Image: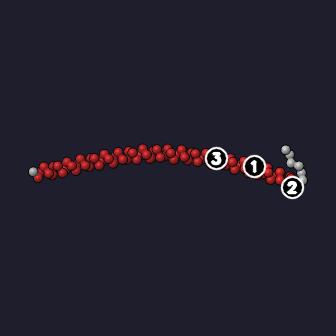
Amino acid sequence: MGYTIIWALLTGLITGGAWVGIVLVQRQRRLTLDQAGLRGELERRLNELEDVNTRLAELEERVEFTERVLAKEREATRLGRPHPE
């Protein structure tokens, strides 16, 4: 009778250990898939940010050009010279 209890405990321990192992492997796979999805999302957002930075740089150049043109027109007006239209 004592051997039956020991056998039942060992069987339960082995079965429980196998179950824990299966759960941990499944969790690791899910985390790996989630991480791959997050990596893809991060790369997409970084590309979008690079695009925004490029567009911002272009806008800055346009604003600076416009400011220079307006400054020249103001200077010409101040000196009494007609500005070209």
How far apart are labels 3 and 2 at the CA level? 36 Å
Disc 1 marks which amino acid? Phe
Kind of residue at badge 2: Arg
Colour setup of the view:
secondary structure
- Tell me which residue sits at (84%, 54%) in the image: 75
Residue 13: x percent and y percent?
A: 22, 50
Q: CA–CA distance between discs 2 and 1?
A: 20 Å
Relative to 78, 34 lies left or right: left
Give x and y (percent) for residue 20. 29, 49
Which residue is disc 2 drawn over? Answer: 78
Q: Is residue 32 left or right of residue 48?
A: left
Q: Residue at (50%, 45%) from the top-left corner?
A: 41
Q: Residue at x 60, y 47 (%)?
A: 50
Q: Quadrant of the C terminus?
A: top right
Percent coordinates x, y for residue 74 in the rendering: 83, 53
Tell which circle, 3 or 2, labels the residue nearer the N-terminal end: 3
Q: Which mark is residue 54?
A: 3
Total of numbered circles in the picture?
A: 3
Q: Which residue is mark 1?
A: 65
| Helix, strand or loop under label 3 | helix
